[in-house]
Image (cartoon, grey):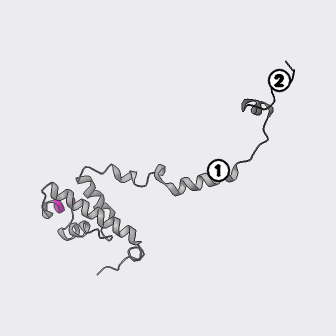
Amino acid sequence: MPKRSAAIDAMPSAVRVQLQELGQNLAIARKRRREPLKVWAQRMGVSEPTLMRLEKGDPSVSMGVYATALWLMGRAQVIADLAAPEHDQGALEDAVRVAKARAVRKSVSLYAAAARGSQHNPVDEGWA
C-alpha cells in the first residue's frame, strides 16, 4: 500500500470542501451526459474506483485525472486560468505595498499648483 502524502494530511478543510464540490460537479456532468461510470472511466483512461474517488473529491486523485475530466466536459480551457497571474490577489497586494514604499513625495512645482487651481490669481493681484 502506498504511503499517504503529508500534503494531504496538511490540506486545509476549505480545500477539501472545494475538492468535494468539484467532484460532485464532475459527477453531475457525467450523469447529465448519461455516461455510465465504466464508459467515462475508459474515456479518461482510469479505473472505475479512481473515477468514483474523483467524484467524491478525493485529494489523492492526481491533478491530471481531474484535468482530463474537465476536458471531457469541454472545460479544459479554465485549467490554466485557475492560477493566472492577473488573478493572484496576494501578489497584487504585495506589489501595491512595494510601490507605496518606493513612492517619494516631491515638492509641488509652481506649474502644478497653478494647474490645481492655485489660490493666487495674477489678475486679482494686479500682475496682468
Residue, x 39% and y 77% (percent of image)? 9
Inspect the image, locate mark 2, and give the three-letter code of the amino acid beneath it: Asp
Q: Which residue is mark 2?
A: 124
Tag 2–tag 1 contact (CB < 8 Å): no
Q: Which mark is residue 37?
A: none
Mark 1 is surrounded, within 10 Å at the Cα level, by few (under 14), some (14 to 19) or many (20 or more) other residues, namely few
Magenta stretch: includes residue 23? no
Q: Which residue is mark 1?
A: 99
Q: Nearer the viewer, residue 26 or 40?
A: 26
Q: Which residue of the protein is positioned furthest toward the top in this rendering?
A: 128
Residue 99, position in %: x, y?
A: 64, 50
Residue 92, position in %: x, y?
A: 54, 53
Residue 39, position in %: x, y?
A: 13, 60
Split into 4 quadrants, where in the image is the N terminus?
bottom left
User: On the rendered structure, is 63 left or right of 49?
Assistant: right
Q: Nearer the viewer, residue 16 or 125?
A: 125
First in sequence: mark 2 vs mark 1:
1
Q: Nearer the viewer, residue 42 or 84?
A: 84
> Which residues are the magenta region?
40-44
User: Is residue 34 positioned above or below 46 on the image?
Assistant: above
User: On the rendered structure, is 102 left or right of 82?
Assistant: right
User: On the rendered structure, is 17 left or right of 54?
Assistant: right
Q: Which of the 4 image quadrants contains residue 127?
A: top right
Split into 4 quadrants, where in the image is the C terminus?
top right
- State the SS at label 1: helix
Residue, x 83% and y 23% (percent of image)? 124
Residue, x 41% and y 71% (percent of image)? 12
Q: Nearer the viewer, residue 70 or 126?
A: 126
Q: Nearer the viewer, mark 2 or mark 1?
A: 2
Q: Which residue of the protein is positioned furthest toward the right in this rendering?
A: 126
Q: Which residue of the protein is positioned furthest toward the front in this rendering?
A: 124
User: Is residue 77 positioned above or below 30 on the image?
Assistant: above
